[in-house]
Image (spheres, rainbow, N blue to C red):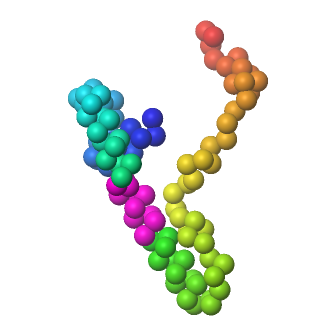
Amino acid sequence: MQFVMRLAREFRRADWRRMLSEMSATELGEWGDYFRMQSFSDVWMDAQFASLKALIVRMVSGSSDAAVADFSLLPEENGIPERTDEELMHLGEGISGG
């Protein structure tokens, strides 16, 4: 789902459901292959600016402690914690009709 949302943002489409309905599975797969090789523009720009900021800090401070990841504006993709089955069952109890 995250890939579809990024693809819609890349194409400047707010209606991602309609975008998917107008696209064949083959075409979606081809876009997936393309973006595995070529990063999305927001990821690419964030990496460029984070690298630049880290280099400036290293140059000014003389220290090599500044990591590029410290200057990234995008959240880490693995930052979403996995929920246990017990947590999911507890959350599902509050859904009406379930």
**Left-right relation of 4 to 72:** left
Q: Which of 64 and 71 is in front in this view?
A: 64
Q: In the image, residue 4 lies at what x, y percent?
A: 38, 38
Q: Please say if 17 is above or below 11.
A: above
| Image point (35%, 41%), residue name | 32
| Image point (25%, 34%), residue name | 27
Q: Nearer the viewer, residue 18 or 79?
A: 79
**Left-right relation of 5 to 74:** left
Q: In the image, residue 85 lies at what x, y percent?
A: 72, 24
Res. 83 image quadrant: top right
Q: Is the magenta stretch mostly helix, strand or loop?
A: helix
Decide if residue 47 is in sight here: yes
Q: Please say if 6 is above or below 50.
A: above
| Magenta range | 38-48
Res. 80 image quadrant: top right
Does 23 lie within the magenta span? no
Q: In the image, residue 50 lies at what x, y percent?
A: 50, 70
